[in-house]
Each structure stands twice: as C-alpha cells, then as structure tokens.
Image (cartoon, rainbow, N blue to C red):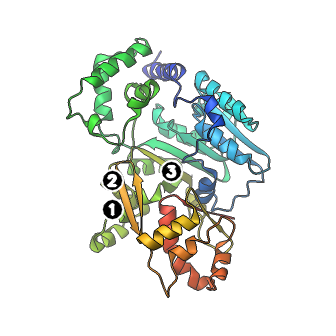
Amino acid sequence: MSSDAQVTEQVIGQYEALPYPPRDPADEAKRLITGSPSFLPELNHYVFGGRRDFSKPFRALVAGGGTGDGTIQLAALLTQTPGAHEVVYLDLSAAARGIAESRAKARGLTNIRFLTGSLLDIATLAPGPYDYIEACGVLHHLDDPAAGLQALSAQLAEGGGLGLMLYGIHGRVGVYPMQAALRQLIPHDIPIPEQVMLAKKLLADLPASNALLRNPVVGDHKASDAGLFDLLLHARDRAYSVMQIGFLLERAGLAASAWIEPCRYDPDSYIKDEDLRARAAQLSPLERAALAERMSSTLKVHAFYAVPKARLSEAVAQPAPDLVPLLHELPPAALATTLDKRGELAINFPAERLVFKTPPRVNGVGAPEIVARMDGRRSLGQIAAEMQIGWDDFLPLYLPVHKLLTGINKLFLRG
C-alpha cells in the first residue's frame, strides 16, 4: 500500500471511530442547525443573484457530508418550497452517514439520497448536473485538493455554483506546531482512544507561552474527543490563505463570489486612515480580501461561494426595484432603533469586535427609516414608493445600508 493510500485509510478510520462533528439525532426535535455556506437565502443571494425560483427542480450535492449539518439544512429549507428537490449526500464514512440518516429520519426528510464513497468518484457514483454543490471541511483533507475541486466543478449545471469551506492558515496559529509535536510522540497506528489520551496528557503540560494556548479562536480540542482528533491528530490537513484559495479556484476555472462574512474580508472594516483606504481601494477584490485576512488574523476557516468565472458578474444579487430585502435574525424595528439611537452597529466576532457607523441621513431620510420597512415582503421599489422617493433618489440612500447589512451577513435579496 502506498503512503497516500495508507493516509487515506487512516482518515477513514478516524471518521469511523469519531464521526465529526458530533451530533445527536434527538436534537433535531429542538433545533435546525443553520450556517454558512448553504443557508438557502444566502446561497440564493451569492450564487443566483437572488433570483432562483426554488419551486422549480433543484438538485444539490453535499460532498463530504459528515454527520449531516449541510445536508439537513439544505433539505429542510428546501421542503418549505414545494418542488422537485433532491439533495445528494456523499461521504467516505459509514458511521457519519448513519448519523446523518438518523437526523434526516428524525425530521421526516425524504428529499435526500445517501451515498458512501469518495467525491473523486462523483462522476460515476452520482453524476451531475447539480445546481449547487457544497464541500465544507473536506478538500483540505484530500491528497490533491485541486483534483477534488475540479471533480466537483465538472458536475455543475450551467448557471450553478459551489459553497466551500477551507481552513484558514492565519487563524490556525499554533495548530500545526502542535500537530508536529504530537506526531513526534504518538504514532498513527495505535488505537484511536490511546492517541486521544496521550494528546490530552501533552496538552495538559503545555507552557503558557504555547501558541495554541494563546490562540483565542481555536477551541475544537476542548469540545470533544472528535474535535481534538480532527484538529490535532488528523493524518492529512492543510490550511489556506485567501490568495492560495484564489489560485486554487483559478485552476478550476472558478472565482469567489463572496467570502462569509463579507465585512471580515473588507479592509475598510479595519483601516480608518483615508490615505491607506485609498491605497487599499486600488487592489483587486482578491487582494483586498487577503489584506483584510492578514490584518484580522482571526479567520480560522474560510467559508465562501464560488462560481465559474464567466458567471461572476451575475452571481451576486444587486439592488433592484423588484427584489425583496430579507433581514436574517435581526428584527427590523429593533435594528432601526439601534441604528437611530446609537448611531452605530457593533458586531462581535470571535476575538474581534467591529463597529460600523450608521450611514448619514440625507434630507432627513436614512438607514433607520429604510430598515424599519424591511419586513421580508416589501420589495425595494415598494419601500421607495412608500417613502415617496423615486428609485433614482432612493438607490443612493439604500446602497450604504445594503453594504452595512450584507457586510455582516444579515441581509439578503430575493425575487
């Protein structure tokens, strides 16, 4: 057996013994786990320009589905719109698949097809075309991530896109020296429970100067044995910078349409000096995102959407009179009051707090008045008409609000 094949067997063994992330199907009665990518209003906004009609047939692939978070989220949200929907789940781990299937059964979901296998074999196991493909936390565990991404992108339908997540190198400071230290002491061929026990012993002996201990955004090893193994004992693991992801996408003929959350990839969220902002404005979108990543240093993962380069200009929803603004987890009246009375919006991300000023009023009209009308039913054109403002005058008032709220990933447009 080759070295690469041995590592692949170790990876499979890990997820059979410790399915990740740990999930209890009984919890489906209490909550639906949602997140990025693959939250339906979000992917509609960043992949389909906000105009995807989900009552029409929609086919999605979740490659490396694990214990089912992305699969269950997509399948559950799609059931809210009558139509011919199919979500294909694919993973190497039979144990992880079993948990995902139990979660689907607990929810009564019948729009999922479960498969066991490698995403590299998708063309024969379950060929496309797919309107949407999710691959979260899987490409960075492959021997050849570029080959994996190309295998997936080849199955995209015309007009489709992907939701991806890869580890972020700057936010995982301390992880890789710790992995190397554990490899010096713990062989991969001893039982997994013994590996976990020995790793815990070493973690307990770390000096206060250790980079992993000092990293405020990495805590997977504290949550569960599965989290500890996945973070520190994984047999194959690599992390990426924004620029490296850009190169990876380029090789597959893709480009990022959005990084989640957008404000964390915007250098204007960190740079206050106008001269420096002007210099940053001269950079390409990818270079700007890379600059923000370097300044923040807290991005332990990169969640993003990607589309074929030819589709990039049409992928992201742009303000138009017929599109409806949908606020996510922010009640319009409360948000309007905050923007009006505080004059700013403060958002807490892991280890960093970003503060954004309320866009200034023009002729007495501003963000609070617009936001208060975002009930998820009124279109932008209807909001403008209700405020007795023509579209050409309304748009400049709306755009700063749009940038603020899409930046924190709490506003999506839909048809």
Spot occupied by residue 224 in the image (x, y as percentages of width and height): 44, 27
52 to the left or right of 284:
right
Q: Which mark is residue 304?
A: 3
Tag 3: Cα neighbours inside 10 Å, few (<14), some, or many (≥20)? Answer: many
Q: Are marks 2 and 1 in contact (CB under 8 Å)?
A: yes
Real-space Cα separation, disc 3 to disc 1, in angstroms: 20 Å
Q: Secondary structure at mark 1?
A: loop
Q: Which residue is rendered at x = 68% and y = 32% of the image?
A: 124
First in residue order: circle 2 vs circle 1: 1
Amino acid type indicated by mark 1: Tyr
Tag 1: Cα neighbours inside 10 Å, few (<14), some, or many (≥20)? Answer: some
Spot occupied by residue 285 in the image (x, y as percentages of width and height): 43, 62
The residue where tag 2 is placed is 296
Q: Which residue is rendered at x = 62% and y = 44% of the image?
A: 133
First in residue order: circle 3 vs circle 1: 1
Q: Is residue 177 above or below residue 316?
A: above
> Which image quarter: residue 314?
bottom right
